[in-house]
Image (cartoon, helix red, strand yellow):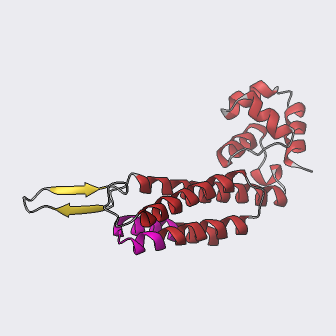
Amino acid sequence: MKFSEKLKKLRTEHNITQEELAEKVHVSRVAVSKWETDRGYPNLDSLQLIARTFDVTVDDLLSSSDIISIARKEKTGFVSILNILAFVLLILPVFRSVLPTGDIVSTWIFNVNYSSVFPFILNIGSILFSVSAGFYNMLSKKSFRTKTVLSCAAFALMILCFILTLQPYPAVFALVLLLVLLKVSRM
């Protein structure tokens, strides 16, 4: 039996309306309706509150396929957020230079004195590619593995672009994001 069917059955057996359940679980009635019509799943906190409300375990509420589906959605969401974090590179200071006067000057990616337009386009393009990969991952029905490969490719391209244009700070930031992505994908 699916989670949606179990939830609806438990709710009707306990004579609780969707509004009452929503209030107990601290969500909207629309969220409960989506759960009962198999158009979404509650997060872990909501699942625990539902289980407590009906005096059952979370395992009783979910089948193994439901658990796998929820875990994949949460992982995919995190991967997408990592890609979108790449947008921070547009506002992250690229260099910190100390002038002869002792003043520290930060330069942003837009202010770097590029010898040609090509490196600038490479950097901006790689950042926008990573951000768009994040949005694609959120909206796509592709497998988690495909989404992870796309995200890793976006970060690798970004790191390469920043290294080629001698910008250490964003290259390190993108490398850290890539390492976090690889760690999450192995969980």
Q: Start and end of the magenta stretch?
A: 160-179
- Which residue appears farthest toward the left when viewing the image? 101
Looking at this view, is 67 or 154 the one in front?
Answer: 154
Image side of residue 41 versus residue 126, left or right: right
Q: Residue at x 68, y 55 (%)?
A: 136
Is most of the magenta stretch helix, strand or loop?
A: helix
Residue 50, picture quadrant: top right
**In which quadrant of the rendered view does residue 27 lie?**
top right
Position of 32 relative to 64 (above/below) = above
Q: Is residue 171 left or right of residue 10?
A: left
168 drawn magenta: yes
Q: Nearer the viewer, residue 120 or 53?
A: 120
Q: Is residue 107 left or right of residue 123?
A: left
Q: Is residue 126 above or below residue 38?
A: below
| Viewer-proximal residue among 69 and 174 | 174
Q: Position of residue 130 (x, y in %)?
A: 56, 60
Residue at x 57% of width, y 54% of height: 81
Q: Residue at x 63, y 69 (%)?
A: 185
Q: Nearer the viewer, residue 150 or 20?
A: 150
User: Residue 148, image x and y in percent?
Assistant: 65, 67
Q: Which residue appears at 52% of the width and 60% of the height?
A: 125
User: Can residue 174 be seen by looking at this rendering?
Assistant: yes
Q: Quadrant of the C terminus?
A: bottom right
